[in-house]
Image (tube, coloured by chain):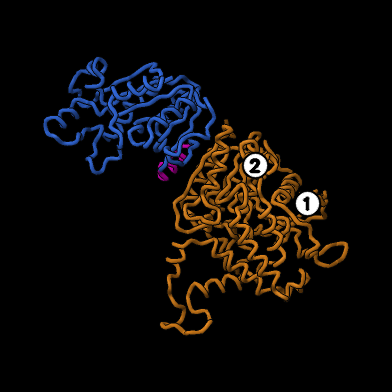
Chain colours: A orange, B blue
Amino acid sequence: MHNDTKDSVGLVRTQTIQLKEKISLDCGTTFGPITVAYETYGRMNEAKSNVILVLHALSGSAHAAGYWTPEDKKPGWWDMMIGPGKALDTNLYCVICSNVLGGCYGTTGPSSINPNTQQPYAMSFPVISISDMVTVQKQLMDQLEIPGLLAIIGGSMGGMQVLEWAVNYPGYVKGAIPIASTARLSAQSIAFNEVGRRAIMADPKWNNGNYDPKDPPARGLEIARMVGHITYLSDESMQKKFGRRLKDTLQYSYDFDPEFEVESYLRYQGKSFVKRFDANAYLYITKAMDYFDIAMRTNGSLEELFKNVTSSFLVMAFSSDWLFPSYQSKAIAKALRTVNKEVTYVEIKSSLGHDAFLLEHQTITHVIKYYLKHLSDGNKK
Amino acid sequence: MKHNTRMRSDWESIEKFIQPSSTVLDLGCGDGSLLELLRKNKNVQVRGVDIDQNNILSCIQKEIPVFQSNLDEGLSDYGDKTFDYVILSLTLQVVYEPRMLLKEIMRVGKKGIVSIPNFGYWISRIQLLIKGTSPVTEHLPYEWYNTPNIRTTTVADFINLCGEMNIRIEATAHTCLKGKKVPSCFATLLPNLFSEVSVFLLS
């Protein structure tokens, strides 16, 4: 079965932990209790100096690698990167991934039961920020008694968390790896998020967030995902993948059923997303991304913000990414070098758009593998 | 292999100009070999900039912090005097704004080290004068139609430019290698004619 393959972490299970303390959120509320779902792969060394924290994107979960059961068809969302001999080599490193605050994969979020009412929080869940997600992760690290991280790594929204980590906990993180990310969400990205949220909230089944989990606002969430999915691809990758090809017919059907391949692909993506994701969580997490502008606390100056950062940085971007265009990653890297921090900036040629961070496996592996080696070699010195 | 020998010649002089345990930025650092050499022999802290993805990947493999960008974008985001040395090895002739870059090198570095292939080399001159063709030498191996070299700098040109820009030339190393057609002292005596590659330590 799956666990026989040499480069897989094999069978894994998601663990949960209750945070000992409530946390104070950016919105001003103190919130708790919080349960955090996480998975670990590989072993911690004696010095506890080989821990890498993986931070997931909008729709990700703690299940980053391996399989839950031998029958699973798909491994965790970043299995191509995590395992024996892979970029995040589990023979060398202890890799941890946790589900974000506000998520729907085991960590407390709007679909969790509010202990005071015994009902799902739904829209009574507080509005959260990327920084709040990181506060929760830091508490998780503390409760797991991890004294510091060799590296933190994440793509897209995961990259935003990487930046928060490096800024909020200087000294705790040795190497920070934001991939296909940004220091502030652009108007274009906010716009796409808003379309997704409007689709959900305009679905009558949404019912101000108070829907039956068995009968969610599926149409709205489906459309939100379809829009989102377009932004993860690129003109070129869509042209290659679908062109103008028709699905089952050779001729136009002259009606409004899905007939182009790209249409049925998007519908499929939308439908399968509904089965695995919570509509309210989509609202909360996209809102957290919209609020993300990490240099707001230093009046917009990234340079000022990065002054006290101690981590080394590896910033990666992809040439055809138009959701988080490379200039946004480059701005992060440039600000870091202005304040004379160690930073490597790579813009990988790819036609795969934003999703390249989940797909350009060979190049990313090369870059991350040697960068982690660089960090570990630094440990030995 | 010729290529390697040639690169090393320019590197030897660069290495001599660098004090141990200093900080070095190499602009157009290629695959990072020069920085690797300097780190090993001089224990310097290294940084690189290059535009080519494969070069970037090689640098990362050598564990050299490297920044992928075009030198023509400038270095404005680096602070003043960030590095002890900023190196520009055989690259000035491919940039669009050599003056701007040179100015930036002197701002960002306490010292600059610039090496150039000398377009005034005697063989190049003979080719142009006698054959009437654009020069092709071991150091400048390209035809006119495929050369990346958009500036044809001679040693004299470069010295003039430094004078004009108030850049002090602290030291120079001129080399002529090619099978020692002429004794190497010729390059030192009459560099504009006999030097194939010249390295300048600037401040």
Label 2: which residue?
A300
Give the chain of mark 2: A
| Secondary structure type for disc 1 | loop
Mark 1 belongs to which amino acid? Cys
Question: Dot 2: few (<14), some (14–19), or many (≥20) neighbours within 10 Å?
Answer: some
Where is residue B176? Give x, y as percent. Answer: 25, 23
The structure residue drawn at horizontal position 46% and vertical position 66%, both measured from the top left corner, is A238
The structure residue drawn at horizontal position 65% and vertical position 40%, both measured from the top left corner, is A173
Check the image and report above or below for A42 versus A13.
above
Q: From the viewer's perspective, is the residue at label 2 or at label 1 nearer?
A: 2
Q: In which quadrant of the rendered image does the N terminus of chain A lie?
A: bottom right
Question: Dot 1: few (<14), some (14–19), or many (≥20) neighbours within 10 Å?
Answer: few
Give the chain of mark 1: A
Q: Which residues are magenta?
A: B52-63
Where is residue A275? Give x, y as percent. Answer: 65, 71
A4 vs A65, nearest the viewer? A65
Q: In which quadrant of the rendered image does the C terminus of chain A lie?
A: top right
Check the image and report above or below for A66 versus B109.
below
Pointers 2 and 1 within a single chain: yes
| Secondary structure type for disc 2 | loop
Mark 2 belongs to which amino acid? Gly
> Is A175 left, or right, of A347 in this rendering?
right
